[in-house]
Amino acid sequence: MKRFVDAVDRSQGLLLPDRLEDYVHEDNPVRVVDAFVEALDLSLLGFEAANRAAAGRPAYHPAALLKIYIYGYLNRIQSSRRLEREAQRNLELIWLTGRLAPDFKTIADFRKDNGSAIRAVCSQFIVLCRKMKVFSHAVVAIDGSKLKAVNSRDRNFTAGKVKARQKQLEESVARYLAELDRADRDPTLLPEGRVLHLKDKLAKLRQQMEKLDAIEQQLQDAPDHQISLTDPDARSMATSGRGTGTVGYNVQAAVDAEHHLIVAHDVTNTGHDRAELSAMARKAKDALGAGHMTALADRGYFNAPEILACEQASIIPLVPKPLTSNSKAEGRFDKRDFVYDPTMDEYECPAGERAIHRFAAEENGLTLHKYWSSACPDCPIRARCTTARYRRITRWEHEHVLERMQMLLDARPQAAVARRQTVEHVFGTLKAWLGTTPLLTKTLPKVKTEISLAVLAYNMKRMIKIMGPQRMLQAIAA
């Protein structure tokens, strides 16, 4: 054919390279995967069969299987069956494993049986990054995101869901019984086939009601009054959309503000972030090896004891306080309009009166101090302050910690923007790599392993982009 590129004749003999080494360019990122895994002490990390006994059938070395998984997550191939096919036809993977092609069950069992060791490998890569001195600024952004589990919403039950489903079934039973009553009064109203169909439907509905009764009993014994049938650890969680939710896991990440590397991560099945701030911040601080650190987070992390725990761990938290009071919206003064005097331990109200300390009480594990002024009943602007007889002000015993944090936030108005730019695109990237399908594994420990592989692949690809393959190989060899 004229003016077209000619294809090679399939029957023609080819002089292909004799060595596997010739199939992979020296700057190929797959060489970084190979060098990184070869530099690890797999026995020390806890991989099974790293020191296999001489007896028995030879096993695949953990290094080969670990390389397969890292390569798979780097290239958005998470399924063990797809990895099995790629190991037989993908030249990069053939080079990486030395033409080993384990079956999908061997690949899947490796991830299942070596969860803690795989998570340790993810931490080892952060140690490598620290040795390369990429964490020059001890500033991280912390956030969480919900990922869908292998458990549909129909197979997740709460007390509210069970009640709603029971009501639907009762309405359906009443409707079918009414139709059968009409057929009894006048058999010509319904054909015989329809009557048999209704009786079959009623039998199935009664079976469903019996199952719901059993589930309702199990809910009473469950610690959090929630049951998932497919993945027992998955939990129903609210999402940003009104009236929507997902059954899944809450993935937490602390991201370095300079290079956007995930320095620490965790997976929980709690639907909110209020109790995660100090734990994630301490993990990030340990990973960075820093004496002091700044942690940026959104309003969902605001929790007074968690903020205090960060301060005690030499971590500066910057978390906006959510405005839960309706006073401003209703045209009244809120707590910010009252000025605290630490020397006198009292507040000055907008009318210029003194709200003195009255007593202290413990609520939800916190010691709270109560203040109010005796001038409240006769105050001319009381209607703008409170609907009660006295305006009572509550102050936590460590309120100065929250006030100091608010002053730092006021001095850094770009903190919220920096947090969004740092952490939210990281979650967007991870979700794009994992795809729209649910997570592949079940139960919390296995999901943690799956997320660790995704985080390791993200960090590795990010470092290769920043440093280049050759500098990465040199750092690993050093």
Image: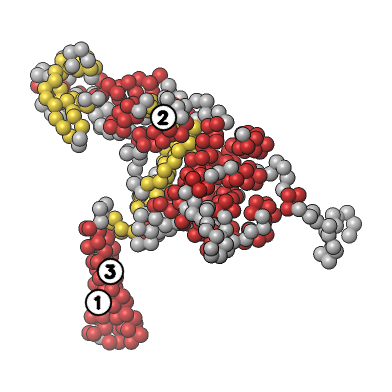
Residue 331 is situated, as x and y percent measured from the top left of the image, at 25, 27
Q: Which residue is mark 3?
A: 211
Packing grade of label 2 (10 A; few <14, some 14-19, many >=20) is: many
Percent across and percent down for residue 34 are: 62, 46
Marks 2 and 1, how far apart in space? 62 Å
Q: Are marks 1 and 3 in contact (CB under 8 Å)?
A: no
Mark yes or no: residue 414 visible.
Answer: yes
Q: Is residue 415 above or below residue 231?
A: above
Marks 1 and 3: which is nearer the front? 3
Q: Residue furthest front?
A: 54
Query: Helix, strand or loop at disc 2?
Result: strand
The kind of residue on which mark 1 rests is: Leu
Image-based side of 120 in relation to 23, left or right: left
Residue type for callout 2: Ala
- Identified at 50% across, 30% down, the residue is 257
Whether tag 2 and tag 1 are in contact, CB under 8 A, the answer is no
Front residue of 379/361: it is 361
**For discs 2 and 3, the disc positioned in front in the rendered view:** 2
Query: Could you tell me residue 465's position as x and y percent?
Result: 62, 37
Residue 473: quarter of image:
top right
Among the two numbered marks 2 and 3 on one chain, the one whose residue lies closer to the N terminus: 3
Dot 2 or dot 1: first in sequence order is 1
Circle 1 packing at 10 Å, graded few (<14), some (14-19), many (20+), is some
Q: Residue at x 51, y 40 (%)?
A: 124
In this rendering, the answer to whether 455 lies above or below 133 is below
Residue where numbered disc 2 is placed? 295
- Horizontal arrangement in the rendering, residue 195 relative to residue 342 (left or right): right
